[in-house]
Amino acid sequence: MIAKLKAFWRIVRRLSGDDAYEQYLKHYAHYHQTDAGHECHPPLSKADFFRQWQDEKWNGIKRCC
């Protein structure tokens, strides 16, 4: 029962975007830290990540007409 509740909660977090920063950190660790031949910037802080995410989401014209 607990496992089903945890799985349901993970789905809710994924759909709402609440786990976006955790997914970003996983992506960063997998694709950017392991590349020894390419020096990367450090991962964004949580505040910087959400600021960038909001800027990308709302930048430009967002209307139907």
Image (cartoon, helix red, strand yellow):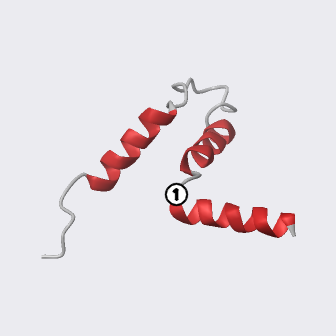
Q: Position of residue 22 (x, y in %)?
A: 62, 45
Residue at 59% over, 52% down: 19
Residue at 58% over, 27% down: 38
Quadrant containing the N terminus is bottom right
Residue type beneath disc 1? Gly
Residue at 56% over, 23% down: 39
Identify which residue, 27 or 35, lies in the foreground.
27
Q: Secondary structure at mark 1?
A: loop
Quadrant containing the C terminus is bottom left
Q: Position of residue 15 (x, y in %)?
A: 56, 66
Q: Position of residue 48 (x, y in %)?
A: 42, 33
Identify which residue, 3 or 17, lies in the foreground.
3
Instruction: Tell me the quarter of the picture where residue 5 sits.
Output: bottom right
Pointer 1: what residue? Answer: 17
Q: Is residue 35 left or right of residue 6?
A: left
Residue density around tag 1, few if under 14, some if 14–19, many if 20 or more, within 10 Å: few
Q: Is residue 43 above or below residue 8?
A: above
Q: Is residue 35 left or right of residue 45?
A: right
Q: Is residue 17 left or right of residue 55?
A: right
